[in-house]
Image (cartoon, helix red, strand yellow):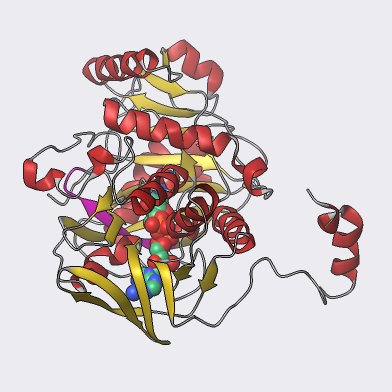
Amino acid sequence: MTARYSIFSLARHALGGHRGWPVAWRSPEPQPAYDVVIVGGGGHGLATAYYLALNHGPRRIAVLEKGWLGGGNTGRNTTIVRSDYRLPESADFMEFSLQLWEGLSQALNFNVMLSQRSYIDLAHSDGQLEDFMRRGNAMRLRGIDAELLDRAALERLVPPLDLSPEARFPVVGGLMQPRGGTARHDAVAWGYARAADGLGVDIVEDCEVTGIEVSDGRVSGVETSRGRIGADQVAISVAGNSSHVAALAGLRLPIETASVQAFVSEPVKPVLDRVVCFNAGMSYVSQTDKGEILLGGDSDPYNSYAQRGSITAIEETLVRAVAMFPFLSRLRMMRSWGGIGDISMDGLGIVGKTPVSGLYLNGGWGYSGFKATPAVGWTLAHTIAHDAPHELNAPFALARFERGALIDEAGIGPAPSLH
Ligand SMILES: Cc1cc2nc3c(=O)[nH]c(=O)nc-3n(C[C@H](O)[C@H](O)[C@H](O)COP(=O)(O)OP(=O)(O)OC[C@H]3O[C@@H](n4cnc5c(N)ncnc54)[C@H](O)[C@@H]3O)c2cc1C
């Protein structure tokens, strides 16, 4: 923490009505042209701008955001970070991301409140436990931490968990990643924004991209609600709006869009110090630093661009959460909200080049992309700088859907229940 954020200056600003509080990032007018325009000011777009400016030499870079920073899925997710993937492509990508998470507060000089409180997947049958064993072994072979848990270990690690054999879906064991956990989602957007701004990136809020200029198969700029902006390279990083924005350049994506919801209860005393996921249908639970119980579940069962959700998904998420932790039935739910999940055909993201020269795409992460934020930023920045993928995002190319080279991790990322 720098001197300008010392405890004394915090107290002075608090008592002085926050007058003169230093701005975290500028609000520049958009310039007529940039070398690189990044569409979307969520964590992914901001991280891309930051690593592009940090790792790849001077460029004129702008991030264009139609609303406010972090107002999309970055500020709406359930904050889980982990790298407990089975297949080499996704495990290496997410482990690289987790390693970046582990140094992120220091790198950005901004506390993203990473809490490696562990992430536990519950198994409800011997077959599921065997599957977890294989995944755990695959992780350990790649140097990623994983521990298989029996019922006695679960009883010790998660005291409020219902382990009774009479349960409708009795818990037989689990798989834990001790280094998994949570991070403060909006702090991630703010931290990347402040650091990118410090490296000269123009972050332009309230600036919607309404058109993408393509001539002779090459991108040349964007139309926006604040006028035309020329650009040699354009990266689309708009999560739930991926299909709409890519269509502006004539691209049709293998992505479906559905609402994904989350819920918090009234705050209670510390009762749960891990993230726990029920896997007879999906529902996961953690406790926030404020004491709220935070719940997430599967996507809504139909396509939608609404940032709110259906009663069915609320009911299913809560039923499973109460099956895990019966004490939850005595808590009041305080808030629910929805984000727009961009779900690819294999449930993992698309990061790389498009058929349009100079146009890049990051999207399709559905409800598993928060954890990928640092790795997406790092590898997309590399792809833009070299006009070629980094070795870690090469398998995440859009072209994998043409070749049938899917990364089939459906049980670990969002279950692509829509297909
Ligand atoms: C309820 C919920 C729970 C989730 N839980 C988790 C979790 O626990 N762990 C995890 O890893 N992932 C989780 N996710 C997924 C994760 O939130 C996303 O994958 C990730 O945040 C995507 O980041 P982003 O920066 O691409 O998207 P966003 O934060 O959505 O940023 C995209 C930005 O693009 C802007 N935009 C859109 N169209 C335009 C346009 N035309 N012009 C300019 N700007 C535009 C939007 O306003 C938005 O700010 C969850 C998602 C939801 C909805």
Q: Nearer the viewer, residue 263 or 418?
A: 418
Residue drawn at point x = 63 percent, y = 48 percent: 108
Q: Is residue 285 above or below residue 361?
A: above
Q: Is residue 68 magenta?
A: no
Q: Is residue 178 above or below residue 141?
A: below
Q: How many marks?
A: 0
Q: Position of residue 106 (x, y in %)?
A: 67, 41
Q: Nearer the viewer, residue 384 or 99?
A: 384
Q: Is residue 341 magenta?
A: yes
Residue drawn at point x = 58 percent, y = 78 percent: 28
243 displayed left or right of 135? left
Whether residue 190 is visible: yes
313 displayed left or right of 214? right
Q: Quadrant of ligand 1?
A: bottom left
Judged by its main secondary structure, the magenta piece is strand
For the record, the magenta segment spans: 337-346
Residue drawn at point x = 14 percent, y = 48 percent: 399
Q: Position of residue 272 (x, y in %)?
A: 57, 34
Residue 253, image quadrant: bottom left
Whether residue 325 is visible: no
Q: Position of residue 52 (x, y in %)?
A: 47, 53
Residue drawn at point x = 26 percent, y = 39 percent: 394
Q: Nearer the viewer, residue 24 or 179?
A: 24
Q: Position of residue 306 (x, y in %)?
A: 31, 70
103 displayed left or right of 254? right
Q: Is residue 334 above or below residue 32?
A: above
